[in-house]
Image (spheres, rainbow, N blue to C red):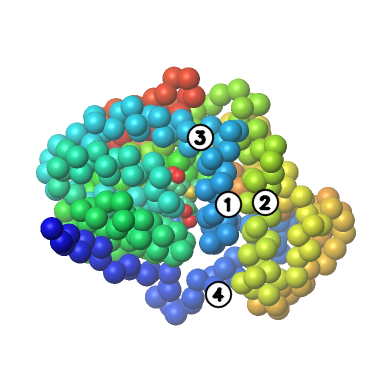
Amino acid sequence: MEQTPTVAPMIDLSRKEDGTSSKETFSKDVAEGLSQFPKSLPSRYFYDAAGSKLFQDIMALPEYYLTRCEFKVLTDNRQEIARQFAASGFFHLIDLGAGDALKTKILLRELSQQKSEFDYVPVDISGDAMQQLTDSLQQEMPSVDVQAVVGEYFPALEWLQENKAERKVVLFLGSNIGNFKADESRHFLQRICSNLSSGDKLLMGIDLRKDPDTILSAYNDASGVTAEFNLNLLRRINRELGGEFDVEQFRHYPIYNPHEGVMRSFLVSKKEQDVYIRDTGQTFHFDAWEAIHTENSHKYSLQQVSELGKACGFSVETVFQDEACSFADVLFTVA
Ligand SMILES: C[S@@+](CC[C@H](N)C(=O)[O-])C[C@H]1O[C@@H](n2cnc3c(N)ncnc32)[C@H](O)[C@@H]1O
């Protein structure tokens, strides 16, 4: 029997209302980050086509326990999670920063099997990732209704608020919340909450605090894939903004602070150098061993997560956890 087409055209919110393109915003953010002291670059620019591919390679690394652990948590608890999602009838399943949705697919399969009524709305700034995901879902799960949105989290949530009226279940997997600083994560969860209604849900992946060596190796693998992922940010600036980085003259340097529970990644300049970036019209000076901060990854205790959720208008419904790996997927409800 012929399958009814269920894939809606992708919504592209990556062009801002004021007319600025995502490339202009990228150029502005790079100029701002490299002009300040200490230098930094936003981690959301990791994920161009090359970065998304490298991240898929990272997820398969022996040291990168996060994906394996969350995969297990979702696999072991898929029936209960799907049941709780679908308990009140039709819902929009909104996957923030969906990427390749490797783990979300566990839930999509289970929801389909339970004949739950839902549609799937993956959201990601990477248009390439959304195109690939839409194509793969069409192949693997043609019965799932899909409406991919290319854009930043908040414009996408506002678009959803206006265009998708029914009950919402938001996924924020992969410990992505860890990329925000403490005040940013509160602001982020408050904004999610303000775009949801009472009874809507949020399933959030949390990498819990554990042996610092285990954490550090996950961001500093022996085969150097994470280093390539970090350095790809400079390659992307070269490709898209006419940057003149000699990538060989920078190195990946990760460090974990167990006191704060924060993993930080840097790109360190191996020598004093000047780098011209055409689209910014500026030359940036680097002292020898000066660092660019590129990523934070906060590790939480369950108590911190629960307090964070409560402070932002959520209550904890269920904690799904893998004791061995200490990774949790926490199901919150809007109070
Ligand atoms: C670490 S990957 C996680 C992918 C997947 N959710 C998982 O758990 O494996 C992060 C994804 O979030 C996307 N992303 C990062 N910052 C974003 C933002 N501000 N708005 C929308 N998507 C973003 C990236 O493009 C990337 O695909």
Disc nearest the viewer among 4 and 3? 3
The residue tagged 4 is 24
Which of the image's four quarters has the C terminus? top left
Could you say which disc has been placed on residue 66 in the image?
3
Marks 2 and 1, how far apart in space?
A: 8 Å
Q: Nearer the viewer, residue 130 or 38?
A: 130
Indicate the amino acid at tag 4: Glu
Indicate the amino acid at tag 1: Leu
- Residue 214 can be seen, yes or no: yes
The residue tagged 2 is 228
Q: Secondary structure at mark 3?
A: helix
Q: Nearer the viewer, residue 184 or 103?
A: 103
- Residue 193 can be seen, yes or no: no
Does the beta carbon of the residue at mark 2 sit less than 8 Å from ligand 1? no
Left or right: where does residue 303 sit relative to residue 202?
A: right
Marks 3 and 1, how far apart in space?
A: 15 Å
Could you say which disc has been placed on residue 292 in the image?
none
Instruction: Say which label, 4 or 1, has the lower sequence index.
Output: 4
Does the beta carbon of the residue at mark 4 sit less than 8 Å from ligand 1? no
The residue at the far top in this view is 323
Instruction: Say which label, 2 or 1, has the lower sequence index.
Output: 1
Disc nearest the viewer among 4 and 2? 2
Instruction: Say which label, 3 or 1, has the lower sequence index.
Output: 1
Q: Residues within 10 Å of mark 2 (few under 14, many from 20)?
A: some
The residue tagged 1 is 54
Pointers 2 and 1 in contact (C-beta within 8 Å): yes
Pointers 4 and 3 in contact (C-beta within 8 Å): no
Indicate the amino acid at tag 3: Leu
Left or right: where does residue 66 sit relative to residue 36?
A: left
Instruction: Say which label, 4 or 2, has the lower sequence index.
Output: 4
Residue at position x 79%, y 57% from top?
A: 248
Q: Residues within 10 Å of mark 4 (few under 14, many from 20)?
A: some
